[in-house]
Image (spheres, rainbow, N blue to C red):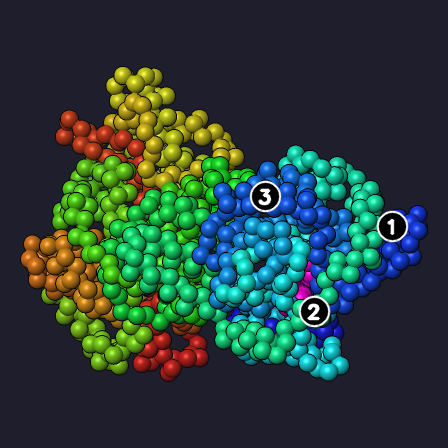
Amino acid sequence: MSPRYAPLVPADELASPASYRQLRREREATRFRREIEAMVDRACRAEADGPLLRNTFTSLSGNLAAEGALSFAGLVPPERFDSARRVYDSAIDTRGSRGSLHNYLNVADAGSLVEHPDFREAFSHPLLVALVAHALGGPVKIIDLRAKDTQPLDVVARDNTLHVDNSPFMDEFKVIVTWTMGTGRGPSGQGLTYLPRTNRLLRQCYVDDDGTVWSDEDSCIFPSQTRVDEALAAQARFFDDGLPRVVHLEDIPAPCHTIFAASRLVHHRYRTSAGGPRSAIMAAFHRTDEGTGFLGANDLPGSALDRFLLATGDGRSFLELLADEMPRVVAALAAAASRPAFVVDPDRHLLRDEGFRAWYERQSAGVSLDRLRRATLASAVEDDTPVVQRLVLRMQYDLQGALNMPLYTDLREEVRKRARIVIREMTPEHIRDIVTRHDLGALLRAESAAPRRPVSELADELHSALVVLRQLLSTAVASRPAGPVWGSTDGNAAALSLRRFIVDLCVAAADIADEASLATGCVFGALGSVLADDLFDLGAPGREITGELFGMYIRLAAPSLGERCPAPPEKEKLATYLESVNEERQTAKLASEVWFQAASAEVTARNDDFVRTLLRRVLPPGRPSPESGDLGALLADPAALNAYYWERVVAGKSVAMRFGAADLDTLDGYFGLTAGRSLPDAVARLREETTPGSPAAHLLRGIERLASRRGQSHAEACRDVMSRLSTHWPDLARRCRGGPDAAPLPAERILSTLDDAFGVAGEEGRRSRRSSGVPGPRAGSAEVLLTTAEARELARVYMLARLCFSAEEFRIAQLLAGDPRVRYAVLATHLYLVSEVSRSAPELVEGWGTAKVLLPFTEAFVNVSGYSSPVVDLAPNPKLITVISNNLLPAVAGELLRRDATVDEVDADILATGVQAAVQRGVFDVTIGLFNQADRPDVVSLSGLNRRVCPAVRPFGAFCRRWLPYFFDRHPSASKRAGTPGLNCCA
């Protein structure tokens, strides 16, 4: 996407006119218009003043085409409109969003409202429908119907800045009905304002080098003086005097019904503190052949034309249904011909002199939402409003902020609209429920003041988190019904819309350039992640992403919420963590498989959440220029960098060895890849070494058969088998045992049933449910028994899930590990990590009262003084080099192979892509057994399986994606090596 704004141009100046479907079917549209004109003509012939009525329709449709808008006052008789208004007032008062800028209601969610015939007449009167269909040149449906109340307010926000609606690649018309809230009078403030004749132009599109044509929502808005001047200049070509004209529809005696070309006519809602509060109904019309759906109102009483517009119709054609309503069209044409004020004269509502100058200055000053938000929050602080309520207020404002979403030529963005509106217009109660459910108040109180960081860095983090959420949704299946927040939208439609919204939010996040847009992106992402988990049951990975997104948002929003009461650290969470993961048992995996003292899945999930919370406090954001710190002096001399790194390793090696580091005498050993970790080697070794008939042998056979059936790798098949085994383990255990009181079985009795349990395919449900790692309560025990040797053998088999690299990838990775530039980047990144964490670690230790709060990070760095001392002296754990060599460099090698590049051609982009690929390929994701010691010393119990994703993988992966390429490019020999021929990876 691009931060450029697209100009308004005539059709012959478009970069890709063939992409504009409204231009491709002008001949077909002309034929359709003639059919409507003939229909009106036939209906008018029987009337005494038939020619006048026919000419009135011609005049109305001509004015709409020429000016872009057409308004009627009092189209619905006062008694019927008053009936409709009362139903409207009741619905929006009880079900409206009560947002920061307006009170919104999706009319489709208020069945009693859309079923009221007088209410429907306000926006779907047959004359309005005939004029819209004539303008669009084809049969039409209503695809969106909303109600909105607005109070007098001086604000220019995203939704009421000067703009055009929807996509440039199709035409959309809207009917908006406005009146003074609570009365039967027309609007006296907050009225629709537009630039007549700008509908004769189109938004320019963008064309990429590969021919892709696209646009975005920034191209729809005119938020600055330059853009306002551009819109006025574009309009001026259609007036002989070249003067601007701005129509502001207010002070109209009766309710005002306006048809306008929403996707072309430059318009907005002119909000000021003057005038009265406004109520409005807005109906969006598309041609039926756009494929953009329909409103979907069910069991609708009333006319067949109404059912066609709002539901599925009865099978008859649009023109046939419109013909049935011609008597009402003729009656309205008679009113238009005989009542002077029935058709609103736009010239009587032009902004002139001081009125125009005030409008121009206000629009040229740009968006003022931030000022309004700050003032509102400051008042809330002074009023001692609880901090959670202030947070809800802030979120409501940010949901109305700027979000530059992509627009596509095939209109696929239409699918996302429901999800976006559901999130944007959440009621305070829905937001508060989410805030409470995710304990954001505690997160807010625990958040310490952090140094300001560049928006570009924060936007990169947001984009990375959204990419992971997008990937989770790409394979997930909606397994839960849509909640109340979705209104009448069913689960399938909600799932489709939310998927598309997250995909497009990723695109938008890649181009965020200001803090206000960043806050809006974060709050949309966080709430979207909550809705995704509610629909798809994303489990631990989903909760992790939600936590990350809310953490990003809280860090942005916290300073605006006023003074916060500091809360003491939740030391019970550290105590729980240390019960199962301590100085002897550094990871949950080791605790389970080496000492056979596994924490339950529930405790493991809580521990992981605790670690993620600490990570947000301790993992460095990264300064813009690492060269400015102590590391800067070493970067110019790789030998000095190596020497300093080794010096720090030696200082902490005795501690690091307790946490997995090998006792080696040089750095070379740590960069050596572990022999036999390629997938082919591991499979061959397991085939040779696994005891026949053992639990491990049954699991390996199940993996091999699944890999063969699906043509997938053993690692992929292992992940699939273990995922399903984790989900179905309790049922399998009870089925094999025969009853809840039966003694535990040997493990091979269950594992030998893998093929029978899952079937030859099991295909239809293999992705239907991802294990969350926290199984629901079940009756009876799911324990099975096996020897300690069998348990360790079983663990070696299921670790295949992590060994996803080919022998060729491992061979090239070993070459990369010997490349001086790669080594330099790894060491500099590691030192930078330790250096930055050292800045916050002492405060963390002091706050928690113990250095043991640093134990979750021992694979990256260790405390030279140990974990019983309050002294903080961090040194790199060289084990991390081995982790990077074994898990990241083979993925980088895979990227080289994919590009058919040489080892010497590795660059910053390949490094970053390789790190991302490692995470995506699941090297830090494995389902493990929950082993515990049984009564006999050589026997252990297996109570289930638990999917484990390293809680540090997301933030650490993001850190490596940023800093490995950064330091790689700063190796002193980088420029000298450019263009040097090297060894081809495929040689």
Q: Residue 695's quadrant in the figure?
A: top left
Q: Where is mark 1, residue-wise?
A: 39
Q: Where is mark 3, residue-wise?
A: 86
Q: Are marks 3 and 2 in contact (CB under 8 Å)?
A: no
Residue 348 disc label: 2
Q: Is residue 543 above or below residue 564?
A: above
Q: Position of residue 555 (x, y in %)?
A: 31, 61
User: Element under label 3?
Assistant: helix
Q: Are marks 3 and 1 in contact (CB under 8 Å)?
A: no
Q: Is residue 306 above or below residue 16?
A: above
Spatial CA span between label 1 and label 2 = 32 Å
Q: Quadrant of the C terminus?
A: bottom left
- Specify few, some or many for label 3: CA neighbours under 10 Å numbering under 14, 14-19, or 20 or more: some
Q: Earlier in the sequence, mark 3 or mark 2?
A: 3
Look at label 1 and name its amino acid.
Answer: Met
- The residue lying toward the viewer, choosing from 279 and 808, is 279
User: Element under label 1?
Assistant: helix
User: Element under label 2?
Assistant: helix
770 displayed left or right of 599: right
Q: Is residue 543 magenta?
A: no
The residue drawn where x is 74% and y is 77% is: 238
- The residue lying toward the viewer, choosing from 755 and 289, is 289
Q: Position of residue 786 (x, y in %)?
A: 24, 29
Which is in the foreground here, disc 3 or disc 1?
3
Q: Is residue 265 magenta?
A: yes
The answer, for residue 855, to whether it is visible in the render is no
Query: Which residues lie in the magenta part?
Result: 258-266
The residue drawn where x is 29% and y is 60% is: 382
Q: Earlier in the sequence, mark 3 or mark 1?
A: 1
- Specify few, some or many for label 1: CA neighbours under 10 Å numbering under 14, 14-19, or 20 or more: some
Q: Position of residue 677 (x, y in %)?
A: 32, 51
253 displayed left or right of 654: right
